[in-house]
Amino acid sequence: MASITLPNPGVLAASRAVQATTEQPWVRWSLIAIAVAFLGVFLFLPLAIVFSSALERGVSVYVGALREPDAMAAIKLTLIAAGISVPLNMIFGITAAWAIGKFDFLGKSLLITLIDLPFSVSPVVSGLIYVLIFGLQGLLGPWLAAHDLKIIFAVPGIVLATMFVTFPFVARELIPLVEAQGTEEEEAALTLGASGWQTFWRVTLPNVKWGLLYGVILCNARAMGEFGAVSVVSGHIRGRTNTMPLHIEILYNEYQFAPAFAVASLLALLALATLLAKTVVEWKARQQSTELQRMSGEAL
Amino acid sequence: MIRKVCFFVAILGASLLGFGQRVTLLNVSYDPTRELFQDYNAAFAKYWKVKTGQDVTIQQSHGGSSKQARAVIDGLDADIVTLALAYDIDAIADKAHLLPSNWQSRLPNNSSPYTSTIIFLVRKGNPKKIKDWDDLIRPGVSVITPNPKTSGGARWNYLAAWGYALRKSGGDESKARDFVSKLFANVPVLDSGARGSTTTFVERGMGDVLIAWENEALLGANELGKERFEIVVPSTSILCEPSVSVVDRVVDKKGTRATAQAYLEYLYSPEGQEIAAKRYYRPRSAAVLKKYAAQFPNVKLFTIADIAGDWKQAQAKHFADGGIFDQVYSANQ
């Protein structure tokens, strides 16, 4: 290649980069050892403790803890909260990414900042916002009470709080993707006579498919694990408004350590499944992008 | 996708409408009553079924007493509140008008069906030789107690210490203030509720002494490890009167007043008193108290009226923003 005979800045940078990694072997190995030890202490050890504590008093206690009616109710409520908030946030994320990525309008950067808001606000504050709005002493509280509607300390409040904290995941994942893809393909589709809806389903959505799935997985993980915001609006009524994370805290406070860790291990399993799904999706997405590069290379 | 959404909307609807015909009561309570009401709810459901033929389900919510009162004020639909102190129920009456301000006169014994007091839990062998309140302010003794701002038990703890110092000095408030200031200088962490403090002391192994509800300390010592902890009974302590009430606005709306009323009255019955005693609450009934006398240590008890007036006065002077607790705690930081 040309760069062999013509030393250019790129080669200089590359050789420097090589030098930067040719540290003494002991430096390299101790760095690796530190990273592995850190992972071990802060990640694998707690995970191992969760599972060993959960099974400490035998499989029957473990299964019993999960089949106990309050635990079942907590698992069900967690699934309901995630089942409602994830699809809604998916729809929201797609529309937001579509609007922001494909169009220019006034206040666009403000909108992006607002979408990020739930990331920068403490979950406790997110919960309190809903208490201040829907609580009996809050803005809409008296009206809701007069019409016999329950928002906070009931399922709708938990769903709302979950939606609020998981709101940015899908949108944040999609916006850069949609922006990077530009509008050429959509314009081509339109000139070929596709309707707006057809363009969306056949061009835009397939292009962001893997990014979308990735966002949904992250969104789901957070929705099921959320503690702070949900704790504020839950009222902690066992069997009724306790999600899995809240149920774990209650069990722990009642000195029922094995059952607490049993439910915790279920959440941990969920996290591991999420991790696996995330890895698969990342791999698929990478495959798709190299495929695209290859195809565009052939086209040239 | 749409089917899935419909399904969840249906579930949401069902959960909003409530389930079936049985009566459901929600008892919003403070932290250490978990075991008490677990037993009592089962007994009451049985009693009520026999008496009226009606099935009753009692749902429980537990947390720091003031936090729980706050939730009821904000709209948590409690039929019954069973909190750590009268002031927290007063707050529900004052701030949300969900029950009349004379609620305390509606049931016997100031609406307090069982009492308790404040004692100490120490590690086995009592390595720091803690005998009485004075030992808690020695340098190098680490004391665990929850936050008086959010926990009812913590306010009783504080007032027990205050009352001890006040009475010892013959009513000298500056001495009492000095005492609680030194006491809180020895507190490394303030949990938000009594149960959190017990877990900190018992499970996380922090501190030399836990100031706790007698019922919480006895439960901790008897059920979590006689071989690990010891009870220390101070020379004097405070008579704690946890209070109970029906929440009028909620029971009238839900139509559960009769059941809720009976639920509280049954607490005063021999069966109710016996369950309380078994869970280490001091029963009001003399007969039941006599039967369980062996498990309750002999402590000279003073009341809140002896040392701080009523709860409203105590709250304003000690625990309100800028009150004595805030002053001594921030001075220590």
Image: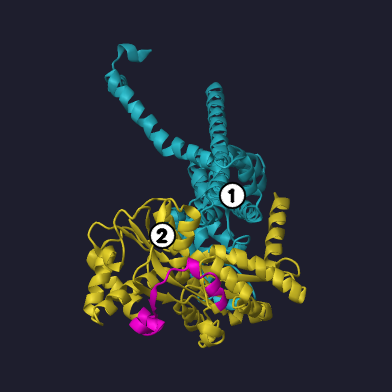
Q: Which residues are drawn in magenta?
A: B287-315
Relative height, residue B118 to residue B8 (above, below): below
Q: Colour of chain A?
A: cyan
x then y, percent, for residue A170: 54, 47
Mark 1 chain: A
Q: Quadrant of the C terminus of chain B?
A: bottom left
Q: Nearer the viewer, mark 2 or mark 1?
A: 2
Spatial CA span between label 2 and label 1: 41 Å
Number of marks: 2
Which amino acid, mark 2?
Ser
The residue identified by callout 2 is B197
Q: Are marks 2 and 1 in contact (CB under 8 Å)?
A: no
x then y, percent, for residue A120: 41, 54
**Looking at the magenta stretch, what is its main secondary structure?**
helix
Q: What sort of colour scheme is used for the picture?
A: by chain
Based on the picture, tell me whether residue B289 belongs to the magenta stretch.
yes
Q: Nearer the viewer, residue A283 or A296?
A: A283
Q: Under tag 1, what secondary structure?
A: helix
Which label is found at residue B22?
none
Q: Quadrant of residue B128?
A: bottom left
Relative height, residue B61 to residue A181 (above, below): below
Based on the picture, tell me whether residue A290 belongs to the magenta stretch.
no
Which residue occupies 60% across, 52% down?
Answer: A82
- Determine crowd level at label 2: few under 14, some 14-19, many 20+ residues with C-alpha closer than 10 A: many
Q: Under tag 2, what secondary structure?
A: helix
The residue identified by callout 1 is A90
Q: Colour of chain B?
A: yellow
- Determine crowd level at label 1: few under 14, some 14-19, many 20+ residues with C-alpha closer than 10 A: many
Q: Quadrant of residue A11?
A: top left
Mark 2 chain: B
Q: Nearer the viewer, residue A17 or B269?
A: B269
x then y, percent, for residue B97: 52, 83
